[in-house]
Image: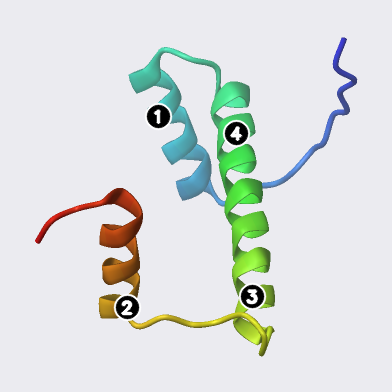
Amino acid sequence: MTLTRSISIKLPMNVYDTIGAIAVEKRRKKTDILKEALELYLEEWHEYKIAVKRLNDVGDEVLSEEEFLQELREDLNWKV
């Protein structure tokens, strides 16, 4: 069983209305829309933090687009 906690927030009317419109469109509760949005945001934040850490790591090689595509072709055995 997953433990949950409640949180109360105040939103600008335009944000509240948008959440309501999405809930109607998806036939889901506003709470579900907010949970999904927060989960997506937190996933993106986690990925962002990893990217910043790698960007600041002088030992982590940074490839140009062409170098990346060449390595990808080699890894996948693509013939170009």
The residue type indicated by label 1 comes to: Ile
Above or below for 71 versus 46:
below
Q: Which tag, 2 or 4, sits closer to the chain's start?
A: 4
As measured in the structure, the alpha-carbon distance from the residue carrying label 3 to the one carrying label 1 is 35 Å
The residue type indicated by label 2 comes to: Glu
Q: Name the residue under label 1.
A: 22
Secondary structure of residue under mark 1: helix
Q: Mark 2 points at which residue?
A: 67
Quadrant of the frame with the C terminus? bottom left
Instruction: Give me the residue at 60% from left, 65% from top.
Output: 48
> Residue 60 at what x, y percent from top left?
62, 80
Secondary structure of residue under mark 3: helix
Q: Picture quarter containing residue 57? A: bottom right
Above or below for 46 versus 15:
below
Q: Picture quarter containing residue 5? A: top right
Quadrant of the frame with the N terminus? top right
As measured in the structure, the alpha-carbon distance from the residue carrying label 2 to the one carrying label 4 is 40 Å
Circle 3 packing at 10 Å, graded few (<14), some (14-19), many (20+), is some
The residue type indicated by label 3 comes to: Arg
The residue type indicated by label 4 comes to: Leu
Q: Which tag, 1 or 2, sits closer to the chain's start?
A: 1
Q: Give the total number of marks visible in the rendering.
A: 4
> Residue 23 at what x, y percent from top left?
45, 23
